Image (cartoon, grey):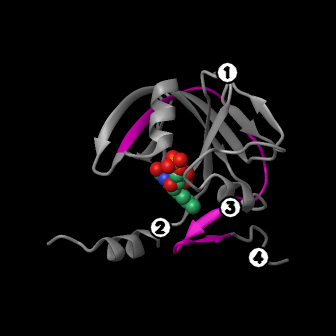
Amino acid sequence: MTIDSAVQRKIMGQFATGVTVVSTQLKNGETWGMTANAVTSLSLDPPLVLLAVVRDSQSHRQFSEENCFALNILAADQQQLSDRFAYAGPKDFSGLEVTSATTGAPILKGVLGWVDCRIKEILPGGDHDIFIGEIVAGESGEGEPLLFFGGKYASINLNPSE
Ligand SMILES: Cc1cc2nc3c(=O)[nH]c(=O)nc-3n(C[C@H](O)[C@H](O)[C@H](O)COP(=O)(O)O)c2cc1C
């Protein structure tokens, strides 16, 4: 049986995820970002993460050409950042406060955590490719996460008694 893609999307939408902005610095000094939730921690030794990227997207070309990316883990109040980097075309960092990670990738102010990675391998995954990144730097913060669930943004209440 081949599952209908709308059905697959609906089923897998029940799997709640966080939301990241994947960033990199281009050779011309410009910055690039893409909203992504197909992200997971893969290995501790060596320290690896996994990111699935649509094969025929501009982001695929930019991350693979630079051979690195950073995952910015968004906080509950950063939904506008997710929306801002979820569309095809030029990625606009204007007006955003950023710092620069080891690879030069921009790290957005106020994120819950970030990891900066060099790409170790790119594996085929249907209409996506799987980017395996080796973590070269990272930091965690505190706060509540932005979630994606059932095709919509969601949040969790960490203090249900309040
Ligand atoms: C919540 C959310 C999660 C997304 N996750 C991914 C993802 O994991 N991988 C991906 O390739 N695109 C993902 N997208 C879509 C990309 O953000 C979007 O297609 C991309 O920015 C298109 O730009 P480009 O064609 O210029 O690369 C996601 C979008 C949203 C709103």
Over which residues does the magenta segment extend?
129-154
Mark toward the viewer: 4 or 1: 1
Residue depicted at x 33% and y 77%: 7
Of pointers 2 and 1, the one earlier in the residue sequence: 2
Of pointers 4 and 1, the one earlier in the residue sequence: 1
Residue picked out by circle 4: 160
Gap in angstroms between the C-alphas marked 4 and 1: 38 Å
Q: Amino acid at mark 3?
A: Leu
Q: Amino acid at mark 4?
A: Pro
Gap in angstroms between the C-alphas marked 3 and 1: 25 Å
> Residue extending furthest left?
1
Mark toward the viewer: 4 or 2: 2
Residue picked out by circle 2: 15
Residue picked out by circle 1: 102
Front-lying residue, 62 or 133: 62
- Marker disc for residue 146: 3
| SS assignment at label 3 | loop
Gap in angstroms between the C-alphas marked 3 and 2: 14 Å
Is residue 96 shown left or right of residue 32?
right
Residue depicted at x 50% and y 33%: 63
Is residue 36 shown left or right of residue 64?
right
Front-lying residue, 140 or 152: 152
Q: Amino acid at mark 2?
A: Phe
Tell whether label 4 touches label 3 (CB within 8 Å): no
> How dense is the environment of label 2, judged by Cα within 10 Å: few (below 14), some, or many (20 and up)?
few
| SS assignment at label 4 | loop
Of pointers 3 and 4, the one earlier in the residue sequence: 3
